[in-house]
Image (spheres, grey):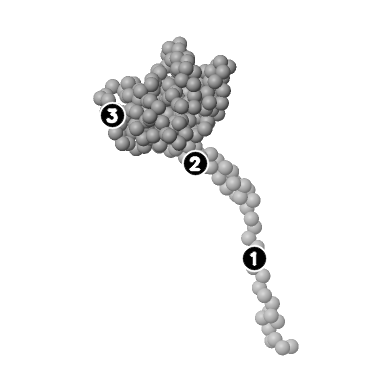
Amino acid sequence: SAFKNQNVAIRKKKKKIPINYNRHYQHQNEIKEVEPNINRNRVDLHKERNNNFNTVIFSDSMPKGIKMYEFNKHLTNGRALMKSFGGATSRELACYIMPTLEDYEFVNAIIHVGIIDILNDSSAKSFELLANNIMKMVHSCRRHGILNISISGLVECEKADIMKMMELNSMLKNICNVNNLSFIDNTNIANFHLSRRDGIHLIESGKRILANNFIKNINSFLPKRLRTFRP
């Protein structure tokens, strides 16, 4: 034969190591038991970071553009978070606020909405729907432990009937009086504070006034000195 030792041409077979399936499944169960704890810790850490905010402002696009970094410097205690949804009606905003309420723990809340509702329909039925949607938001805030809730009065705009706007703001005041809410009066914002482009949104001077109205309201719940917002 060509090979004196026939075993040279034969590959040695490796010993098969038996798999301990019980250990495998045990390891999988340990992973399943650990993962929920990891997720729970992440949620707790997320809420702990979010607890730095004690005030939330829910609004349409009217307050958009207020510099919250400067805004928070003038609060006597804590910080505010702005959640602005451009073009949102009161019905839409009532849905949009829910994720924020679930992720954060606020003490104060400001709700500013209604101009889109009025521009779409200024009938008495629209006013009633707006009032119901605002109260829906108020109840949602209270269910999530918010103590101080404020309704921001609408800013008069060129495209809306002035008499209708006054009627609506009067209705909002009544809602606040009946339900132990705070009303933010924005009648110090005039037509020359509106953008010439659309006659609805605010220019810088109008945003400054609106920001100061919000700051005054928030600081009224906190026992320290009031400061004026000057961006």
Q: Secondary structure at mark 2?
A: helix
Q: Secondary structure at mark 3?
A: loop
Q: From where the camera sits, is residue 124 visible?
A: yes
- Amino acid tagged 3: Thr
Quadrant holding the C terminus: top left
Residue at image location 44% in from the left, 24% down from the top = 156
- Amino acid tagged 1: Lys
Residue indicated by mark 3: 228
Mark 2 or 1, nearer chain start: 1
Residue at image location 37% in from the left, 25% down from the top = 189
Q: Secondary structure at mark 1?
A: loop
Residue 180 percent across, percent down from the top left:
42, 14
Residue 28 percent across, percent down from the top left:
59, 46
Residue indicated by mark 2: 38
Quick check: 6 left or right of 229?
Answer: right
Q: Residues within 10 Å of mark 3 (few under 14, many from 20)?
A: some
Quick check: 54 left or right of 10?
Answer: left
Q: Residue furthest right?
A: 1
Residue indicated by mark 1: 15
Name the mark nearer the viewer: 3 or 2: 3
Residue 205 percent across, percent down from the top left:
34, 32
- Amino acid tagged 2: Ile
Mark 3 or 1, nearer chain start: 1
Mark 3 or 2, nearer chain start: 2
Distance between mark 2 and mark 1 Cα atoms: 39 Å
Residue at image location 56% in from the left, 23% down from the top = 121
